[in-house]
Image (cartoon, rainbow, N blue to C red):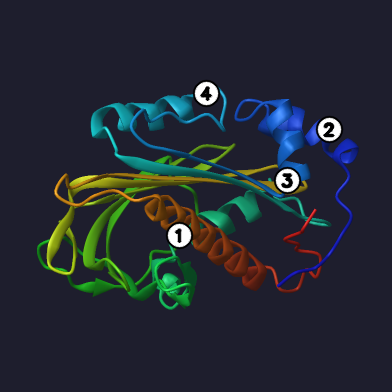
Amino acid sequence: ILFLITYNISLFADEYSQYFSSFITRGTFNRLIEKQEIMKSFGKYPDINIISGSRIKNLITDDLKKLKPTIGVELLKILPMNNIDTHSKKTFLLIYNILHSISTLKGINYFSVTRRKERILFYDSYVIDSPKKENRVKDPFFKKILPDNKLYIFQHDSTLGKNIYLVKYFSNKNRIIMRTENITVIKYLFLPLINKHKLINYFIIIPGSRSILFYGVSFAQFNSIIPVSGKRADSFYNRLKAMYSWFVKMLKKKTENINTLEQTPY
């Protein structure tokens, strides 16, 4: 899915000022172009540093204070686009519907740190009508973007088993936020690995006119009877990368008539 183009920082100076300056600093933006991506992990003293002071950061920080996670990972990526206004209403709605296409997560791959190989992340993934009935329903499709909405999803994780999550969406004209939270106990080999409401993920999409910022952060409070290892941070990182790859693949699929979609190794 890679289409190589030249990505010149100077060409995107106005892009940063107009769309990204309230979310990341100029230095972070330049470093992102140079390093391809920015990742940071945190543990005993959770804090997010990749994004700058904003309402989004405050929203995530509030969750961190309440949850008091034992581990977490941030990931920032940029997806350059060409010959398409990624900030147009049409493209914005397309992205909004992609983030609601939960069933398309079935079968995506990630790199398993413990097994040291690529493997399926979700054996199954779909929207359900409620946590009690758990009836499978179709992915929602929207003709307009809602400022906020929610849905429940079921996912059969290749490592974490079968779980139900509450997914919330918060949107305005500048960004779309997707927040997931487990509402069932997550187990590993029959052990209670993560209790209810103790695993939170954020996936934030901020379109510019020529590129899209993708920010993901995942954090959890693991059960104290199970030791936390450095590999858990690597696992969180690989899962965030898998979600980014899924997003790029879906965006490519939905804009397949545009041959300039690019995920570039700067």
Residue annotated with mark 2: 13
Check disc 1 and report its element: helix, strand or loop.
helix
Left or right: 28 in relation to 15? left
Of label 1 and label 2, which has the lower sequence position?
2
Residue 35's mark? 3
Tell me the tag on residue 54. Answer: 4
Q: Does label 1 or label 4 sit earlier along the sequence? A: 4
What's the residue type where badge 3 is placed?
Answer: Lys
How far apart marks 1 and 3 lie (CA) works out to: 19 Å
Amino acid type at image mark 4? Ser
What is the number of the mark on residue 239? 1
- As helix, strand or loop, the secondary structure at mark 2 comes to helix
- Image vertical order of residue 194 relative to residue 69, above or below: below
Q: Earlier in the sequence, mark 2 or mark 4?
A: 2
Mark 1 vs 2: CB contact within 8 A: no
The residues tagged by marks 1 and 4 sit, at their Cα atoms, a distance apart of 25 Å
- Mark 3, residues whose alpha carbon is within 10 Å: few (<14), some, or many (≥20)? few
Label count reads: 4
Q: Position of residue 2 (x, y in %)?
A: 75, 69
Kind of residue indicated by mark 2: Ala
Q: CA distance from mark 2 to mark 4?
A: 20 Å
Where residue 183 sits: x, y (%)?
Answer: 18, 52
